[in-house]
Image (cartoon, grey):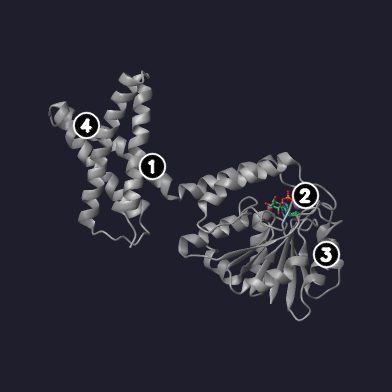
Amino acid sequence: MLSVIIPTYNEKESIIRTIKEAQKSIPRNSKYEVIVVDDDSPDKTWKAVSEYKDKRVKCVRRRKEKGLGSAVLRGFREAKGKYFLVMDADGQHDPSIIPRMLKHIEKNDFVIGSRFVKGGSAKNWSKTRLLYSKLAAMPAKSILDEKVHDPMSGFFMIQRRVYEENKEDITGKGFKIMLELMVFSEKKRRIKAKEVPYAFRPRREGASKLGIKTLVDYGLMLASLAVKGRVLKFVLTGLLGVLVNLGVLYALTEYAGLYYIVSAVIAIEIAILHNFLWNNYWTWRYRKKEQGFVKRLLSFNTVALAGMVINIAALWFFTEIIGLWYLLSQAIGIAIGALLNYFWNDMWTFKSK
Ligand code: GDD
Ligand code: MN
């Protein structure tokens, strides 16, 4: 069975036409249900749906919660089908591709209605809107392992199990529920996605609910997804390492009475060990590592020390030869050292089996 989930807010004028159009597109022999999740719309969208007498169509009227993402999640919770389809109520998503989506869903986890693969389009969009959309999609694409051209699509089909596997993790904040589902899925296993092209149509009636807040939510969501990503873990570990370094240097000099240069050498080594532990058990935690623990530790240590030498060399070079202000040169030196460390550790220390 296919569960079609349609979130609505003030879509009284469009919803019935959208339901009818979807019903016409679903192959005759397929069992299906349509679940409209309405947030108690002032225009009484919920009433229009309940007056549409069809046993396969039901309306969930949410009185307390609000928001597109959480409405879709509510739809998932109610859904009985093996496959879930999410689409907008305003007529922008062309349901005539449903049969093609159904054909692909068995072999894929996600089937995406896509504007940006061959055959797809968003013609009624202005050049600027298109540019914004593509720009906004860039960070989303880089977070994903699977190649997706339209990661912000609100028109998609998933296997029920994709929802089941991720229902504990997913927040449903903001608009990008599919993207969120994909990111969480990829933390658990490799996923397969297929994009089916369609022409994004102009809105039939009413206005878009996508505003500044949506954009902010999207930014926050990406940031939170990135925080869970490897690069940020590495950077945070490094920053924490600096604090450890300073703390040990201070303690050994002030309380243990060591000569500060001696304290500094010990502080550096302790900070390196500290960073290694975080990166080993956190940043690259899920990687099946080829090298044994001791080899990893030696490799990590070596590149950390080499990075410091290169850092100092860059400091000298950019200050003396290029003539930059020494603090700027140091910033460049740190950046070079950090990049070297990251890639060395990614490709060698924590190399995957
Ligand atoms: N229940 C509920 N609650 N539904 C909502 C809410 C809400 O707070 N906000 C919006 N919706 C419903 C709308 O009624 C519509 O059916 C659908 O969600 C999409 O809302 P639109 O306001 O039409 O969004 P859009 O056209 O700007 O954005 C669409 O395209 C984007 C890609 O450019 C959506 O599909 C986005 O998810 C998509 O990223
Ligand atoms: Mn819309």
Quadrant of residue 55 within the rendered picture: bottom right
Query: How far across and how far down the image is residue 262, in percent?
Result: 14, 31
Q: Amino acid at mark 2?
A: Lys
Write the residue at 71% across / 39% down.
128
Query: How far across and how far down the image is residue 68, in percent?
Result: 68, 54
| Labels 2 & 4 near each other (Cβ < 8 A) | no
**Which circle's residue, 3 or 1, is located before the other in the chain?**
3
| Labels 2 & 3 near each other (Cβ < 8 A) | no
- Residue 249 is labelled as 4
Marks 4 and 1, how far apart at CA: 20 Å
Label 4: state its secondary structure: helix
Left or right, 14 with reference to 177: right
Write the residue at 86% across / 72% down.
53
Write the residue at 52% across / 67% down.
165
Residue with the mark numbered 1? 236
Label 1: state its secondary structure: helix
Discs 2/4, front: 2
In the rendered image, the vertical position of residue 338 relative to residue 35, given as above or below: above
